[in-house]
Image (tube, grey):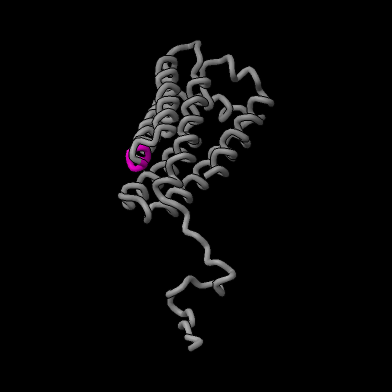
Amino acid sequence: MAKGQACLFGGLGVCVTLRPEGLAVNHGMSYYGVHWQTVLPYAAGLAGAALFTHRALRDAAARTPSPARLRRMADSFVVLLAGIVLTPYTLGGVVDWAHRGLGAALFVLQLLLAGWLVVWAHGDVAGVAFLLVQFGGGVLAAVYVLQTEGLLIHGEATFQLGFALVLARTLPLVAPPIAAPSPAAGGAPAGAPGSAPAVSAQ
């Protein structure tokens, strides 16, 4: 999970370093997908976020209250991110509106996913706080998405940060990692198939 967020924010950091003017224009993160200097780190960052987040969610799905739902959300997350990368808004017309629609669908999916994880974590206080950060970023982005000037990228970055924090906090609570067998136990937990039966010394 951490790798996915490192890819996203690492790629964004490279993009901002190469073209800092992207923070002032109101085109959001998508600004960096239409300039040759930044299209590679932009695409690589989103691809890494999609793949690592997808893997973490699917690996944890079987240990959650709704495995099928979480797997569908994980698959949809990848599809929507790929669609965003492949529909640069500068092409205008139908492509631009498809890009906006995919972005809106991704935000809704991420809010629903974060909401379910917080519910499954029984309303964990930190999880709720991070969800509110995510929601606040989404509201900020929604306010500026159709305006020519504003803070769209700031809202998007806040939204993604909140989403990352929700996942990092709640996923281990909902689906605790499976403990590896202890070497002292001979590599197999007691009672596991293939383990040697205990022999009494009496």
Q: Residue furthest toward the top?
A: 149
**Looking at the magenta stretch, what is its main secondary structure?**
helix
Left or right side of 187 for 193: left
x and y percent of residue 124 in the render? 39, 36
Vertical arrangement, residue 76 with respect to residue 165, above or below: below
Q: Residue furthest toward the bottom?
A: 202
Let me know if residue 185 is in the magenta part. Answer: no
Q: How many marks?
A: 0
Residue 95 visible (yes or no) = no
x and y percent of residue 91 in the render? 49, 26
**Residue range corresponding to the magenta coloring:** 117-121
Let me know if residue 118 is in the magenta part. Answer: yes
x and y percent of residue 156 in the render? 48, 25
Q: Residue furthest toward the right?
A: 18
Left or right side of 121 for 84: right
Vertical arrangement, residue 157 with respect to residue 26, above or below: below
Residue 65 vs residue 182, the one in the foreground: 182
Residue 172 visible (yes or no) = yes
Left or right side of 20 for 156: left
At 47% across and 86% down in the image, what residue appears? 200
At 50% across and 12% down in the image, what residue appears? 150
x and y percent of residue 127 in the render? 42, 34
Residue 50 vs residue 120, the one in the foreground: 120
